[in-house]
Amino acid sequence: MIIIISVLMFFLLLMIGLDVGYSMIVAALAGMFFHAGSPVDPVMAPMTLMSNVDSAALVAVPLFVLAGEIMNQGGLTRRLVEWATAMVGHFRGSLSQVAMTTNLVMAGISGSAVADATATGAMLIPAMKKEGYKPGYAAAVIAAGALLGPILPPSIPMVVYAVIANISVAKLFLGGIVPAMMLFGGFVTICSYTAKRHHYLAKPRVQWREQARSTRIAIWALMVPLLVIVGIRSGWITETEAGGAICIYAIVVGVLIYRDLRFRDLAKVFFSAGKTSAVIMFLLAAAGPFSWLMSEAHIATAIAHAVLGISKDPLVVLLVVNVMLLLVGMVFEPLPALVMFVPTLLPIQAALGIDPIHFATVVIVNLMIGMLHPPVGLLILITSAIGKVRIWSVAVETLPFLGWSLAVLFLISVFPHLVTWLPALLVK
C-alpha cells in the first residue's frame, strides 16, 4: 500500500512539473507517513539522503565533470574537431564523420553525454547546416555521437552503478569498450549511407603532412583516454585519482600548452562544473529515501519473483529486463533510473548467476538509449535547442541510429563475451 501511494505521488509531482529529485523525496516522505504498523522515525529521511552519497568512489563523479569542463574551455575540444577533420574529413558526409569521430574521442575524456553533445554540437551543428545538411539530421548526428560518452571510460553512470552494485569500476569501464566501438561502427556506416543518399559532399583529402601536424597538435587531448585506461589497469591510480589527475593535466595543457585557458577563467569553469555535479549528486541523494522505502516494502523481492516466474533462463530474463528498462527510459533520465531501479534488479542478476559486469553493461547501454527517443530523449532536447530545430524533426532523423543501438543492445545481451572478454583479459 505504502509503495503504491509513493509511486502515485511521484508521478503526480512529475506531471505538475516538480524536479525529479524533489519528487522522489516528497513521495518517499508520503510513504513513510502512511507506513503501516510501527511509525517511521522522520530522521530516516536525512539519514538515507546522506548514506546514498556517502561513498569515496563517488568523488570521481565531480572530478570527471570538472575535467570535461576544463577541456572544453581549454581548447582541447576544438583541437579534436580539427584533428578529426584532417583524418576523416575526406570520407563521404565529411562533417557527420567528423562529428562521430570527435565524439568518440570526447567520450574517453568527459564521461558525460550531455557535456559531449553541448561541446561538439555548438561547433558542428551550425557548420553542417551551413554545408547543406538537413537541420534535423545534423542535430541527430550529434545526439547519436554523444551517446558514446557514458559507455566508454571514464563514464559517470558506470561509477554510479559500480557504487550501487559494489562491483569493480575498472572492469565495468573495460566492459563498455566493445559495445561502444560496435555503436560507433554502425553510426559511421549510417552517416556514410545517408551522405550518399542526400549527396552530402566530402572535403578534399588532407595530405599526410597536415594529418601529422593535426595529430601533433591534438596529441595532448588524444592521450587522455589512454592515460585513464593504462593508469587504472596498471594499478598506478584509482578511478578517483584518475579524475583528479585528468583535471590537473587539463589545466596544464589548457593554460601552458594551448593557452586558451587563463587562470582567471578557472573560477567560471569550477562554478559550471559545480552546478553540474550538484545536480548529479542531489539526484543520487534524493533516491536514498525512495530506495529505503522500496526495500522496506520488499519491492525488489517481489519484482525479482515476478520476473523469475516468467522463466529461469538467464537469456529470456535478460530480454525481459531489457524491455522493462526500455519502457523506463521513455519516462526517466538515465541517472535517476539507475539509482531507482538497479537495487531492484540486482537480486535477479544474483539469482540467475549472470555475470555482474555483463549485466551492468547491458543495463547502462539500455538506459543510455533512452536519451535517443521521446518523450524524455535528453540528447534530442539538447541538440534541438543548440541547432534551433524542432524536436520532432530530430527524433525522426535519429531513428536509424536508434535502430542500430537496439541491435547492439540485443547482441551484447545474447553474446556476453562481447562485454566480458576484455575485462577478463586485462583485469585480474
Image (cartoon, helix red, strand yellow):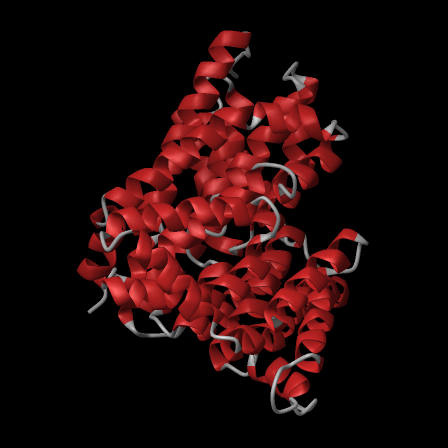
Q: Residue at x 37, y 51 (%)?
A: 362
Residue 48 vertical placement versus 256 (above, below): below
Q: Position of residue 200 (x, y in %)?
A: 55, 12
Residue 184 vertical placement versus 166 (above, below): above
Q: Residue at x 58, y 34 (%)?
A: 142
In the foreground, 355 or 422? 355
Q: Position of residue 285 (x, y in %)?
A: 62, 75
Residue 151 vertical placement versus 252 (above, below): above
Q: Residue furthest right?
A: 16
Which part of the image, by quadrant, shows the N terminus? Answer: bottom right
| Residue 207 visible here | no
Q: Position of residue 109 (x, y in %)?
A: 50, 54
Q: Residue at x 41, y 53 (%)?
A: 363
- Give the left or right position of residue 333, taking residue 408 as reference: right
- Give the left or right position of residue 391, taking residue 228 as reference: right
In the foreground, 253 or 411? 411
Residue 196 vertical placement versus 117 (above, below): above
Q: Position of residue 336 (x, y in %)?
A: 59, 60
In the foreground, 93 or 275? 275
Which part of the image, by quadrant, shows the C terminus? Answer: bottom left
- Give the left or right position of residue 268, taking residue 195 as reference: right
Q: Residue at x 49, y 52 (%)?
A: 150
| Residue 148 visible here | yes
Q: How many marks?
A: 0
